[in-house]
Image (tube, grey):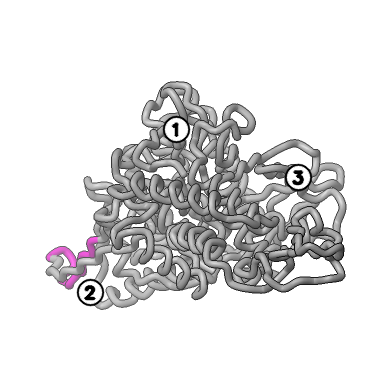
């Protein structure tokens, strides 16, 4: 097993490096360093160097994410009855996922030294492994002819040619001490590995692991501790070599265990077990994993999803329930899918990542600061109310503009709405006795507008730097997002007071001590001033999602 302390990182910190946008995540040969490097996901520019525990955490959680992604896609293949659906080829230590046109979209390479340990545990039951064949002192006379070459001829002076056979190698179910040591060594490594993978350790495995530790190691020694990794590996290699020398009978079970342990202890990143482009372990199109992670988080967190372009597995079952244009998606029965372009009777379907419909009314006081003040009007000898309006939340700019327009249409004769110097701030002048009426009008307008808020969410495998400039990828993404908005607005059954918000969600590494403004550890919005003009001008927000929080939810059962 390799030492996490020696693992080099590629954090994509150079914004002008053309390889920065490469969607590969995993371990492969470095073009810069002499050896291998761990290529981290986009958004990990601030990942700290030299943090052994954090490096180990990232590696093992990424390993689990890749395994879940592989298993979910294999489940899709088993459940699908239709020809021409996504295809998966499994061979050696890699899986290739193919689309309907037989184009390769994903190459997932497994990590050999871990796979052998887990597969050996799955293939062999411990109670069977512990039963070995050893020498038996009993004699089976029906097989005596097979042992004549081992016989000792006794010369007693007679002609009867008496022979003596000491023992026979016959099958006998007994617990052999030295073979059991191999099992204990295997269980120790397996237990350490499963703890790092956050898997449940079998009670029998844990028992044998503790027995091995008590007999051969100190309490502090561990395979995955920075200060004891090297010493522990050296000691385990010595024990494995000793067990192999003194074990007389070696059956298939023995060799499967021995080879799994040997590969784990001696397997390094310089082994000749790479795949395309020097790839040792990882996925070459990580955006697909990121989308599955985000969709899983959304379905486990939100209850207002009406459409999603995904087939993620929740509780062992795919969420996809409808087919549009040959693709399986999630669509609520009462949601009329408007995302298509029709030409000569044929529909070409678009597939936004996620659509949410929020139907909760918003409190007027949380959006607009309303400050009324009565004063005497000497011209009319009456009393007026000056109402000052100020927008508090810029997310509701569209509502504020609509509110001012509608209030202008229903002002009292001779009264008016005056814009102030500060943007999104107005003064209303009304007779004092009409103040409550105008306040009621504002609440009605708000309720009508806020009851139907659609959020179009697109999972983007971008880093922060990419969304700060009007590059080609951002412009294409904006065009797609505006197309989704237009399709939703053009839907015949759309509500009259329909409001739409668009968001891009990108991965981001947050340290454990990061402070979140709203107390929600899922992430923060980027400041509008930092975004590319094409995003700001079209009202598209960019949310930096906490990668570890999204991943934690993805890996939950």
Q: Secondary structure at mark 1?
A: strand
Q: How dense is the environment of label 2, judged by Cα within 10 Å: few (below 14), some, or many (20 and up)?
A: some
Q: Position of residue 51 (x, y in %)?
A: 29, 45
Identify the secondary structure beneath mark 3: strand
Q: Could you tell me how many numbered marks the image carries?
A: 3
Q: Is residue 126 left or right of residue 450?
A: right
Along the horizontal axis of the image, is 504 left or right of 310?
A: left
Badge 1 density bin: few <14, some 14–19, many ≥20, Cα 10 Å: many
Placement of 259 over or under 134, stated as above or below: above
- Choose top left, top right, bottom left or bottom right for residue 518: bottom left
The residue at 36%/66% (across/down) is 214
Residue 37 vertical position relative to residue 372 in the rendered view, above or below: above
Q: Is residue 385 magenta?
A: yes
Measuring 33% from the left and 42% from the top, which residue is drawn there? Answer: 47
Check disc 3 and report the residue beneath it: 89
In depth, the one of 357 and 115 nearer the eye is 115
* Of labels 1 and 2, the one closer to you: 1
Q: CA distance from mark 1 to mark 2?
A: 72 Å
Marks 1/3 in contact by CB < 8 Å: the verdict is no
Q: Secondary structure at mark 2?
A: helix
Q: As displayed, is residue 210 above or below residue 309?
A: below
Magenta stretch encompasses residue 206 = no
Q: Which mark is residue 432?
A: 2
Magenta region:
378-388
The main secondary structure of the magenta stretch is strand
In-front residue for pair 436/83: 83
Where residue 255 sits: x, y (%)? 64, 52
């Amino acid at each position: 097993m390799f030492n996490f302390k020696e693992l080099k990182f590629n954090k994509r910190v150079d914004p002008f490096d053309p390889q920065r946008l490469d969607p590969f995540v995993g371990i492969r040969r470095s073009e810069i360093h002499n050896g291998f490097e761990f290529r981290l996901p986009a958004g990990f520019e601030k990942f700290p160097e030299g943090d052994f525990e954090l490096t180990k955490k990232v590696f093992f959680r990424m390993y689990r994410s890749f395994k879940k992604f592989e298993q979910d896609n294999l489940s899709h293949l088993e459940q699908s009855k239709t020809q021409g659906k996504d295809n998966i080829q499994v061979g050696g230590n890699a899986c290739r996922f193919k689309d309907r046109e037989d184009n390769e979209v994903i190459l997932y390479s497994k990590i050999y030294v871990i796979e052998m340990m887990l597969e050996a545990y799955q293939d062999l039951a411990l109670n069977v492994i512990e039963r070995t064949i050893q020498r038996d002192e009993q004699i089976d006379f029906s097989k005596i002819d097979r042992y004549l070459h081992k016989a000792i001829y006794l010369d007693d002076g007679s002609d009867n040619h008496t022979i003596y056979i000491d023992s026979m190698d016959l099958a006998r179910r007994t617990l052999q001490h030295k073979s059991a040591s191999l099992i204990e060594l295997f269980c120790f490594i397996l237990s350490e590995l499963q703890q790092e993978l956050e898997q449940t350790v079998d009670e029998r495995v844990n028992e044998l692991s503790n027995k091995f530790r008590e007999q051969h190691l100190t309490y502090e020694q561990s395979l995955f501790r920075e200060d004891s990794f090297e010493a522990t590996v050296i000691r385990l290699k010595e024990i494995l070599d000793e067990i192999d020398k003194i074990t007389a009978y070696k059956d298939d079970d023995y060799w499967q265990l021995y080879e799994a342990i040997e590969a784990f202890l001696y397997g390094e990143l310089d082994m000749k077990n790479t795949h395309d482009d020097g790839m040792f372990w990882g996925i070459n199109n990580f955006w697909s994993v990121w989308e599955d992670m985000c969709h899983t988080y959304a379905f486990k967190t939100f209850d207002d999803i009406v459409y999603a372009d995904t087939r993620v597995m929740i509780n062992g079952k795919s969420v996809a329930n409808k087919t549009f244009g040959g693709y399986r998606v999630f669509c609520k029965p009462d949601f009329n899918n408007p995302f298509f372009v029709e030409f000569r009777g044929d529909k070409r379907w678009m597939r936004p990542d996620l659509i949410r419909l929020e139907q909760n009314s918003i409190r007027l006081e949380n959006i607009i600061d309303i400050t009324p003040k009565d004063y005497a009007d000497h011209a009319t000898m009456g009393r007026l109310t000056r109402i000052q309006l100020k927008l508090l939340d810029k997310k509701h700019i569209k509502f504020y503009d609509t509110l001012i327009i509608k209030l202008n249409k229903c002002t009292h004769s001779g009264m008016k709405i005056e814009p102030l110097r500060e943007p999104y701030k107005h003064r209303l002048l009304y007779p004092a006795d009409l103040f409550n009426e105008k306040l009621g009008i504002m609440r009605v307008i708000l309720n009508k507008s806020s009851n139907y808020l659609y959020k179009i969410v697109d999972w983007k495998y971008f880093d922060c730097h990419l969304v700060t400039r009007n590059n080609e990828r951002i412009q294409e993404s904006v065009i797609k997002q505006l197309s989704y908005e237009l399709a939703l607005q053009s839907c015949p059954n759309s509500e009259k007071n329909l409001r739409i918000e668009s968001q891009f969600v990108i991965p981001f590494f947050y340290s454990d001590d990061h402070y979140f403004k709203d107390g929600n550890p899922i992430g923060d919005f980027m400041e509008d001033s930092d975004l590319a003009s094409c995003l700001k001008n079209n009202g598209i927000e960019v949310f930096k999602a906490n990668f570890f929080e999204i991943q934690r939810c993805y890996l939950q059962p």
